[in-house]
Structure formats: C-alpha cells, structure tokens
Image (spheres, rainbow, N blue to C red):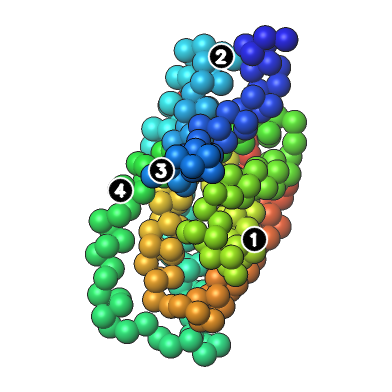
Amino acid sequence: MSIRSLAREKPLRVYFPLAFLLSWYPWLLSLLGVPKASGINPLGPLVAGLILSGLAGGWPAVRGLLLRIVRVRVAPRWYAVALLLPVLLLASSLAINIALGAPAPTVAQWQKWPEVFASFLFTLVFVGLGEEPGWRGYALPQLQRVRTPLSAALVLGAIWALWHVPLMGKEFAWPVVPCFLISVFAASVVFAWLYNGARESVLLCMMMHAAVNVTGAGYVFRFYGGADLTRLWWIYALVWATAAALIAWRAGPALGRRTATPA
C-alpha cells in the first residue's frame, strides 16, 4: 500500500509517527550526541497535519484545516471559555494550595502580571499554532469518525501526554510528572468539548492552550518551590480532572459535537 493510499484509508497510522518525528528530532539528535540539540519542536503536529491533509485530500483538505485555524465566527461565550476557564481553574488551585498551608503570593510576585500578556501572543503563535491544528484540527476529527468524542479525547490525551516525553525531567520535574499526565488527559477532554462546541474552531483551542501555559507554568507556578509547588501541581491536576468530569457528565459522550459544522 502506498503512503498516499495509507493516508486516505488509515491516516492516523501515518499522522502520529510523522508528528512525533517532526517534533522529537531535536531530542533524538541530542541522544546521538549532537550538541545544542534538545527538546521538542512544537510545530511538528501542525506540519504533519498539513502533509497528511494534502496526501489524503489535496488542496481542499488543506484548505479545510487552514479555515478551521482562522475560524473566528464563534459565539462570544466560547471566547470566554477559552480565555477565562484556565484562569478560573488556576485561581481555584492557588486558593486551595494557600488554604492547605502554602504562603500567599507576595505583592512583588503579583506585580509580574504584565509578563503574562507579553508572552501570550508568542505562545499562541509558536506553541498553540504548532500543536492545536494537529491535535484538535486534524487528529481529533479523524478519531471522532470511529469513536465517541469522549473516547476520542481520551485516546488523544494519551498520545498528547506521550508526545511530551522529551520534556519530562527537564521542563517538568519528575515528582510532578504524574500530575502533569493527569492534567493532560483532563485537558484533552476540555479541549475536545471546546472544539466541538465552538464550531470546530482551532483558533479557540490555540487561545486556551496559550492561556493555560502563560498563566500556569509561566506565572503562578513560579511563585512556589519544593513541597508547596508539588502540592499545587497535584491540586491543579485534580481541579482539571474535576472540570473534565463535570463537562463529560453535562455534555455526555458527544462533548457538544454536531453532525455538521457550517463554514
């Protein structure tokens, strides 16, 4: 079977290995001793999605993916969900951590809030644009063709978590890796619900991804260290898991998916 035929009949069998290869090559090169090579290229999922779309459906399929990336005609409530839900979950986690004995952030720590806005656009373009068109824009619709959206989100969550392996022990210290994995699984459900509810807008998933990264690891998580940070990670993971469970309960296995989405 040719690559083109495989891309049409079993697209995810090609997509996931290609997305990993295009993302992991710096880490793989570092394992081979190549200097200054490390980490993940976050553009891998996007590039793999464009390649597979082109192989399977030509320009119309590529155009469809690109249009989902720039779909802005979405009900305002979904913009609020994309930007404010991560803040709400993070604020709840912080409040619980303080209630359990962590010190409240100092005024000096809070005063660094302008950094959040400064890094949001960079994260949106470099991380959100790299990952979300691949995970939600390409892979999720393929999975939802043969699975319920909830099941598809959980499968994608496992793959999404595995994709972060090169960052474990580096960007994510080993004691918090289990918490991170839980949060990724939970976030996969929340992101699928957002994608399906917001007319399959990849843009809103990109915005939520950026909001999660810049407010959490980029801001509030830097307030703490040691046991206080580990506790915050566990709380954060459980809060996200609770949110995902509530969404799955309220929305059902369809996670807000409609049979068709208008252009």
Residue 58 % position (x, y): 52, 11
Q: Which mark is residue 44?
A: none
Query: Please, what secondary structure does the residue beneath circle 1 have?
Result: helix
Work out which quarter of the rendered image holds the N terminus and state it.
Answer: top right
Query: Please, what secondary structure does the residue beneath circle 2 have?
Result: helix
Q: Is residue 48 left or right of residue 256?
A: left
At label 2, which amino acid type do we have?
Answer: Leu
The mark closer to the camera, 1 or 3, is: 3
Is any atom of residue 22 visible in this view? yes
Query: Please, what secondary structure does the residue beneath circle 3 have?
Result: loop
At label 3, which amino acid type do we have?
Answer: Pro
**First in residue order: circle 2 vs circle 3:** 3
How far separated are the C-alphas under marks 2 and 1? Answer: 34 Å
Question: Mark 2 = which residue?
Answer: 55
Q: Which mark is residue 121?
A: 4
The mark closer to the camera, 4 or 3, is: 3
Q: What's the residue at 63%, 47% (across, down)?
A: 162
10 Å neighbourhood of mark 3: few (<14), some, or many (≥20)? few
**First in residue order: circle 1 vs circle 3:** 3
Question: Mark 1 = which residue?
Answer: 182
At label 4, which amino acid type do we have?
Answer: Leu
Question: Is there CB contact under 8 Å for labels 4 and 1?
Answer: no
Residue 245 % position (x, y): 68, 60
Residue nearest the observer in this picture, 220 or 192? 220
